[in-house]
Image (cartoon, helix red, strand yellow):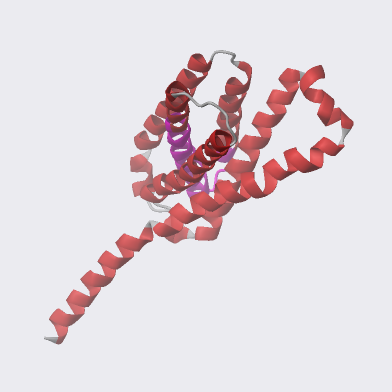
Amino acid sequence: MGYYANQAAVRLAGKAFRKWHDLAPLCMGAAAFGVSQLLLRLPILQHVLPQFDWFLMLPYTRPVFYGLFLAVTAGLFEETARWIGYRILGKRYRGFRDGIVFGLGHGGLEALWVFWMIGKQVLAGAAVSPLNLAVALLERLGAVSFHVGASVMVLLGVRQKKIRWLFLAVALHTLLDLCAVLVNSVWISEGIALAAGAGMLLWAFRRKRTFAVSD
């Protein structure tokens, strides 16, 4: 009886662990966005840098450089936050599934923040058409997909101890955000976002076997 009781306890513990295991990377992914963007980057852009005249004039004197500055800082802050988040989680959370869930947490909180901002505009009297909401949903679909792929990419770098994957994630993130800033057509911009998200997801799942190899 003792043997069977122990086996049952082990199975129950395993099920509980699998059930709650995803909570840590999900919350860490959300924290990576919350800390890097909402607590650090955006306050710096909105409250610190506007105190300098060169920054206030930048959108008018050098709009391309301004867009590049916004894109680079977004990529640098968010991807570095992913790297730090994985280091905090430790080796227990370095499987392929952990990377996927981490990206869902990161992109999910960003999506909630974006729609919360849209909701504030609606409450303030701004007109938001169904078409605008559809565009926002498409943009978020591409963004979340990209975040999932980028999270797997950064996690691969952490597992392999190769920082080049972090640099590549920063570069791709920068390029995607720069396209969003420079492209005037909303539909072209959303098409690029969806294509980038799909490409990153495809890349991530093609690397799934790599995660089966132990560190």
Residue furthest left as drawn: 1
Residue 197: image quadrant is: top left
> Which residues make up the magenta segment?
141-166
Q: Quadrant of residue 2?
A: bottom left
* Outermost bottom residue: 2
Q: Can you give x and y, in whole percent of width and height, for residue 213 in the image? A: 36, 49
Establish if 212 lies above or below 125. below
Report the magenta stretch's main SS: helix
Residue 209 image point, x, y percent: 33, 42
Q: Is residue 143 above or below residue 64?
A: below
> On the rendered structure, is 1 left or right of 26?
left
Residue 27 percent coordinates (x, y):
47, 55
Q: Residue furthest right?
A: 53
Instruction: Please state, as top left, top right, bottom left or bottom right, where the N terminus lies in the image.
Output: bottom left
Q: Is residue 178 magenta?
A: no
- Closer to us: 171 or 194: 194
> Is residue 184 shown above or below 173?
above
Rendering coords of residue 154 (x, y %):
51, 43
